[in-house]
Image: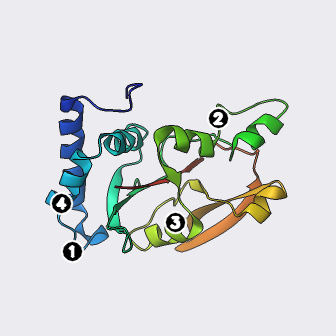
Amino acid sequence: MSNKKELSKDQAAELLQVLKARFEKNMNRHKGVEWDKVQAKLEASPQKLWSLDAMEETGGEPDVVGVDKKTGEYIFYDCSAESPKRRSLCYDQEALESRKQHKPSGSAIDVSASMGIEILTEEEYRELQTLGKFDTKTSSWVKTPDNIRKLGGAVFCDRRYDTVFLYHNGAESYYAARGFRGVLKV
C-alpha cells in the first residue's frame, strides 16, 4: 500500500487477478453479476481498488456479495473464513483513549476509516452468514447503535453451534480472536 492510496499498474493488475479468481470460485455469493462489469468499475475507481488491496493485504479476502439496488454499486465484504488479521483492536477512538493501561494498537473504526471502508452492520454480518460459515473460531466487531455506544458498550458477532450470535462488550475491550469485517461499495 502506498501513501497516495493508489496502486501501481502492476499492483492493480495483480489484485484484479486475485479478485477475479475468487469471484469465479465463489459464484454462489453473487448470482447474476458479471465480472467484466465489476472489473470496469474497479478500473475506473483507483482509490476503491486501493481499499480492496488494503482488505486483501490484511487477510480479508474481499469478494462481491451483491449489487446496491438504489445506486447500482457492487458490494464487497471481507469473506475470509475467520475474522481478518486486523485484530486486537478496541471498538473506536473514544474507547482507545479511555484505556489507562495495556492499550491496543488501535480501534476497529479508525483502522477501517484508514482503509477507506466501513465495518459491517449487524444486518450485513447476518447477510454474509447466509453465504457460508464465517467466524466459527473468531468474532468480529459490528457497527454499534448509538444508544449502546453512548453507554460505553459495543457489539460483535460470531457463528457458534451453527447460529449467528450478537454479543456485547465494553467498547474498550480487545481480544486476539476479535477483529472486524469491512464493506466497500464500488
Cα separation, mark 1 vs mark 4, equals 11 Å
For the residue marked with disc 4, what is the amino acid? Lys
User: Which dot, 4 or 2, sits closer to the camera?
Assistant: 4
**What is the number of callouts on the image?**
4
N-term-proximal mark, 1 vs 4: 1
Q: Which residue is mark 1?
A: 32
Q: Is residue 136 above or below residue 179?
A: below
Estimate the x, y position of residue 55 in percent, counting from the top left: 41, 44
Check residue 37 in the rendering and tell me which mark sits there, or answer none.
4
Cα separation, mark 2 vs mark 1, equals 38 Å
Cα separation, mark 1 vs mark 3, equals 21 Å
N-term-proximal mark, 3 vs 2: 2
Estimate the x, y position of residue 109 in percent, counting from the top left: 61, 46
Estimate the x, y position of residue 23 in percent, counting from the top left: 23, 58
Cα separation, mark 4 vs mark 3, equals 25 Å
Q: Quadrant of the C terminus?
A: bottom left
Q: Are marks 1 and 3 in contact (CB under 8 Å)?
A: no
For the residue marked with disc 2, what is the amino acid? Gly
User: At 48% from the left edge and 48% from the top edge, which residue is drawn?
Assistant: 117
Q: Residues within 10 Å of mark 3 (few under 14, many from 20)?
A: many
For the residue marked with disc 3, what is the amino acid? Tyr
For the residue marked with disc 1, what is the amino acid? Gly
Q: Are marks 4 and 2 in contact (CB under 8 Å)?
A: no
Q: Which residue is mark 2?
A: 106
Q: Quadrant of residue 70?
A: bottom left
